[in-house]
Amino acid sequence: MTVYAVYYASDETQADVFDLALDEQFGDTYRVSDDFWLIDTAHESDTIYGALRDAIRKRDRLFIAEITRDFFPGLSHSALSWLLSPRRSWKGRYVAREVADRIRAAA
């Protein structure tokens, strides 16, 4: 499985419809902000797009990218807890161990 960053923007305020579609299709999701989600799935990015196609309108903007543990987080405590949960199926090296340790200590 892989963790993906998903950016979605709509001029027609469809983010709640998109959020529902993500949750129904993939379950293990975290909504970071109005237009940004994290999902943990075994699917590839083109499959993610295909599953969400009905929730996306022509003028909407969408970006889906695999992320690794090699990141610098500037997210909320809640978002970081989701990202650094032992349930995540990360690929790649892990460089943010001190961040995870601080989050676990604060919990």
Image: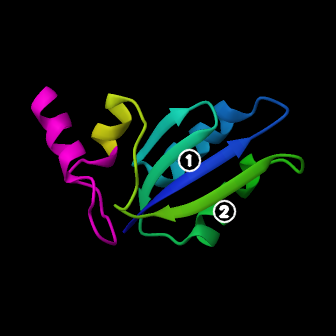
Residue kind at label 2, given as amino acid type: Tyr
Quadrant containing the C terminus is top left
Query: Magenta segment: does it hold 66?
Result: no
In the figure, residue 91 lies in which quadrant?
Answer: bottom left
Q: Which residues are magenta?
A: 83-107
Taking the image as shown, residue 45 lies to the left or right of residue 13, namely left
Residue drawn at the location 29% of the way across and 56% of the way down? 88
Give the mark nearer the N terminus: 2 vs 1: 1
Q: Position of residue 77 (x, y in %)?
A: 32, 30
Is 89 situated left or right of 57 in this image?
left
Q: CA distance from mark 2 to mark 1?
A: 10 Å
Q: Secondary structure at mark 1?
A: helix
Quickly name the residue at label 2.
49
Which residue is depicted at the point 61% across and 59% down?
Answer: 64
* Residue 95, numbered label: none
Question: Which residue is disc 1 drawn over?
Answer: 22
Q: Position of residue 105 (x, y in %)?
A: 10, 32
Q: Position of residue 84 (x, y in %)?
A: 27, 48
